[in-house]
Image: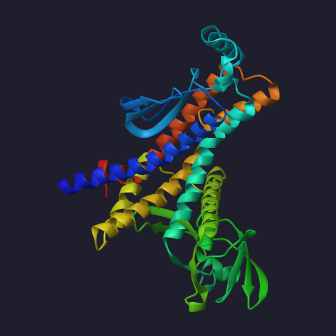
Amino acid sequence: MLDFIGSLLGTLAAFVAVLGLVIVIHELGHFSVAKLFGVKIDRFSIGFGKTLWSRIDRSGVEWRLAALPLGGYVKFSGDLDVTGVPDREGLDALREQIVVEQGPGAERAYYHFKPIWQRALVVLAGPVANFLLAITIFAVLAMAMGETVLLKPRIGSVEAGSPAAAAGFQVDDLIVEADGRRIERWEDLQLHISGRAGQPIRFEVDRAGQLVDLTATPGAREVQSEIDQSTVRMGYLGVGPSQSRADYEVHRYNLPQALVFGVRQTGGILDSTLTYLGRIFTGRESGDQLSGPIGIARASGAIADHAITGAQSFGEGALRLFFSLLTLAGLLSVAVGFFNLLPVPILDGGHLVFYAYEAVARRPLNAQFQEAGFRVGLALLVGLMLFATWNDLNKLNLFAFLGGTS
């Protein structure tokens, strides 16, 4: 029982630490660019609910730490409308109120009276901050690895009857490109194939010094995670890497190379995410791999346990745990940045859509349409959250347990 409680507390602590870092950086992105443009800000809150600690700085911003540390927010002065984009009547009323209370010209410090391009950059800064965090994390990890062994994408074996065999791949083929994208490491090949089961891929391979074009359609396999034992459906070709020492390269990253590595990793994750979502909308994937807070918490705890298990000392365990959770934070930061750019009214992407309309129509969208969009967006997010939670519970076999089945 004590072991279970300890494991649960460890899982919650890891989850809060990872999610908290990602959300705080997201909100700091909004905050920093707003400050750059002289926007008047009332509050920066880490967490929601009851205030545990707060102080007001010299610029009048209240810095708050709240009881529920699952997120955060920035509150701009005068930001009272639920959508955050008042219509023309709302803006006129707000301007009149500010002028009466603070005098003419005071409204220019308020977010809603800033030029559209500045407001758009403030909104965009949150997701961009997440992408920059991910790039930084992956770059730090690359440099912290010291000497890293990179494996060239040279084929060492071809599985009989596999998609690769049917496409004509041969041992010693060096994969150069996949769908026009450069493939430099075996990991690049795995990442490109994993989310494209049943989708033809055009390959360019170097075969004994000559370039050969091949087209292969990956099959699908259920793969069990070594960390949390969850099952994931992934594409496969049926090829194995070369074991020749000549195809292993020992590499040490300097700062510029590490930053390039971070950009590539972040771009690869975004590409995989877009591919997976595209396959859901085209009916090629069921969407059962989408995860919500339960899945993220479970992954955080499993990664923490996996990192600590086998450590020879407390220091080694702590270091492995730190780097493992840092990797998860990088992955989650890309996901949060991408998710917030979706054109859903309640998200940053939805605000950008409203601003695009305002730029073209030369006036904000009517408040009734904004409120309707807000309600639809909220319904979509709740539906998506429920669907992701259903997936998480299915992976825990909770429904089979409640139903008395095995």
Q: Residue at the spot x=65%, y=65% of the render?
A: 260
- Which residue is at the front of the view, 220 or 224? 224
Q: Is residue 289 in sight in this rendering?
A: no
| Position of residue 244 in the picture relative to residue 303 (left or right) | right
The C terminus lies in which quarter of the figure? bottom left
| Position of residue 115 in the picture relative to residue 400 (left or right) | right
- Which residue is at the front of the view, 366 or 162? 366
Q: At which x and y percent is residue 233?
A: 52, 63
Q: At which x and y percent is residue 347?
A: 60, 36
- Which residue is at the front of the view, 94 or 298? 94
54 shown above or below 185: above
170 shown above or below 142: below
| Position of residue 378 in the picture relative to residue 359 (left or right) | left
| Position of residue 246 in the picture relative to residue 295 (left or right) | right
Q: Residue at the spot x=40%, y=40% of the render?
A: 69
Q: At which x and y percent is residue 125?
A: 63, 42
Q: Is residue 366 in sight in this rendering?
A: yes
342 shown above or below 207: above
The N terminus lies in which quarter of the figure? bottom left
